[in-house]
Image: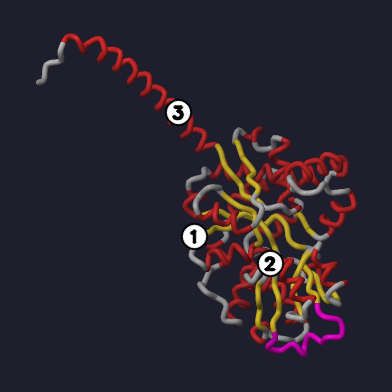
Amino acid sequence: MVAVPRTDQKNMSMSNKGMKLLLFIIITIYASTSIGHARSYKIGITPWAGCSPFNIAEAKGFWSESGIYVEVVSYKNTKKMIKALKYRRVHMIYQMMGTLVDLYMKGVPIKIIAESSWSNGGDKIIVKKGVDITSLNQEKFGLYLNDPSVLFFAHKYLSSQNLKSKNFQFSQAEPESLVKDFIADKFKAIVIYNPFVLSAEKEGNGSMVATSADFPGCMPEGMAARIDVLNAIPNKDMISILTGLIKAVRWLKDENNAEEFKHILNSRTFDGYPDLSNDDIKVMLNDLKIHDPAQMAERNKDNGGLYNYLGELKQMLKANNMLKKDFDPKKIFDNKNIMEALKAR
């Protein structure tokens, strides 16, 4: 045992008090952080009208009234949002289902939680005027995103023309570059969306031959999380998150809320972008189908619309040698929480 000199005892006493205080602060911070983490969640979205119910739920307090805190984090592009999901910076994201399947095939342990909307004309196929799509065999087909979500839409259209997707060379480019290449005749056919459609038609001599509305449900969108992150979230909290989303959808569809909805879109969903007019919002909502509770139930139920979509998507990928990793629709999608939330509606 080492003796402590008497001259240091006072300093040591002060040091002990300081250490106790520091320890108390650390324990308090740790406890509050742990509690906060258990009851606080982050959902990643991108600027898109389909994401607006999340902004509504946050703005209207539909989650806080259930005793949980949910922060909606907006990312300027999908790549940044997906990176945040991979590295657990957010608990879940809203994205096109085909893109979520692509993540799974690339090794990200993903679980789909619920489908809540789909593209209903927002995505369009533009072909050069006077060009017969059947004459473009083995030629390049431009896509703003070369993944299963957009490929499935292109596949649906080509199949309607008795053409096979594997006979085309699909090539990806950012929307602005894609339209420029279309104008420059580097592509004779592209998949694009507003506001880029106008340039493709006017400057690129293009003609719209199909939209996602022609193939209902071909581009569904919804929520997903990493499996490890999802497993750590109590079921009651997950149900509360989904219940808040359902309440937000019901609120959105009430015409009495139109002006407040416009404010939420401009101040949250599209924060940092030019304000949307009433006409802009009308066009956006016409290009999109946000499911009401009854439609959510039909799409998310066992062997319902989403299961069928995932099965068809798998067949398309396999037939065109694009199935990088096999998946079971009933395992990649877990509908128990959304169905419980819908029961409580």
Q: What is the chief secondary structure element of the magenta stretch? A: loop
Q: Nearer the viewer, mark 3 or mark 1?
A: 3
**Which residue is found at the position 59% from the left and 49% from the top?**
337
Q: Secondary structure at mark 1?
A: loop
The residue that disc 3 covers is 29
Q: CA distance from mark 2 to mark 3?
A: 44 Å
Q: Quadrant of residue 136?
A: bottom right
Residue ID at (53%, 47%): 89
Q: Earlier in the sequence, mark 2 or mark 1?
A: 1
**CB-based contact (under 8 Å), mark 3 and mark 1:** no
Three-letter code for the amino acid on which mark 1 is drawn? Pro
129 and 251: which one is in front?
A: 129
Residue 233 placement (x, y as % from top left): 51, 44
Q: Residue at label 1?
A: 109
Q: Nearer the viewer, residue 54 or 299?
A: 54
Kind of residue sitting beneath label 3 = Ile
Whole-angstrom CA distance, mark 2 to mark 1, is 27 Å
**Residue furthest toward the right?**
279
Q: Earlier in the sequence, mark 3 or mark 1?
A: 3
In the picture of the structure, the residue carrying the numbered disc 2 is 174
Element class at badge 2: loop
Please determine whether, in this image, residue 213 is positioned above or below residue 286. below
* Figure check: 330 above or below 319: above
Using the image as rendered, state which of residue 179 and residue 141 is in the foreground.
Answer: 179
In screen coordinates, is 203 left or right of 61? right
Res 81 → quadrant: bottom right
Asked which secondary structure carries label 3, the reply is helix
Write down the region rendered in magenta.
127-139
Distance from disc 3 to disc 1, alpha carbons, whole Å, reads 31 Å
